[in-house]
Amino acid sequence: MSNKDELMSAPIIDTFGRKHTYLRISLTDKCNLRCTYCMPQEDMQFMPSKWLMQADEIRALSEIFVEMGVEKIRLTGGEPLIRKDAQQIISNLGQLNTSLTLTTNAVFADQFIPTFKQAGVQSLNVSLDTLREDRFKSITKRDHFALTLAHIRLLLTEGFVVKINMVVMRGINEDEVNDFVRLTLDEPNLHVRFIEFMPFKGNQWDMSKIVSYADLLTMIGDEFDYLPIQPEANDTARRYHVNGAGGTFGIISTVTHPFCAGCNRIRLTADGKLKNCLFDTSEMDLLTPLRRGEDVRALIHQHFYKKHFAHGGHAGFTEQQAKTDYEQNRQMIAIGG
């Protein structure tokens, strides 16, 4: 192997020494729900199909990233299972030498149980922000509450680990935090992740709507005795378990208690743009050169060499700065969860 070949297949390491081994691939910017913090407009203009990575292109790019040291791939959206070729994509990636998982709203999960198992998927993240039917409809603008709960139970029955992602928003659903913690008491394969409300283009974010890491722990401590869990390398969630509980809860505190020092994540948008941080407005087009038959590895290294230490280079997270800087980014649904 030549020195050039060794360089091209070298691990993806930024200037801060962080090795990037976790690839998140968005399959689509479309979704069957309309959660306001993610897709705030009913009249969203979605990407034309010709802009999206096709199944063979997703596999080709994934193979390149695995060769460069990626150990875990997560499929996201939008809603990844809404794609007509989702089963093919999942099956293709299940053949790679890496672990595979998904983030989904679970509405279509029952149709994919055999595909998940065949591809080696062992756990799924399910987005669910409330345990109340009327509130679910208010947040998502859709009436799929019973179906979502039924499919979470189905996934657990079929032996999958389920991580529920709850975006906590003050004045909307913070009064349900302990109801979600209670879900973890008797189910060892169920884990809850509370996510701080993050700013993105058009989602009406402001600091007053954030329920912070500290506030969440105080709320939970009012009802439960809990202990911290030893963190693993590159954890985004600070994890805990209630004494005697089978499952766990964790807090993803992107705004008030960030975890950028251990970041190992790579993001690939549905239209084949590489992002080295969720909040960085700069992107690297990989799909166009891939379609021209070019080797994209040098572009990947180039983009991660420019990665900032935290928050995409937006130093000093303040409300006014967030509204100014983060509004320049894509909407959350156009990046990938």
Image: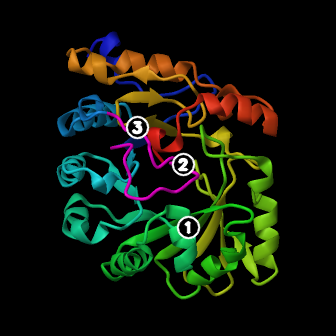
**Image mark for residue 45:** 3
Q: Is residue 318 visible?
A: no
Q: Is residue 20 above or below residue 285?
A: below
**Image mark for residue 40:** 2
Relative depth, front residue between 125 and 187:
125
Q: Which residue corresponds to mark 1?
A: 138
Percent position of residue 7, x then y: 38, 17
Which residues make up the magenta segment? 27-47
Q: Label 2 to label 1, Cα distance in Å?
A: 12 Å
The amino acid at mark 1 is Ser
Disc 2, SS: loop
Residue pushed farthest front? 43
**Image mark for residue 304:** none
Disc 3, SS: loop
Image colouring: rainbow
Q: Quadrant of the N terminus?
A: top left
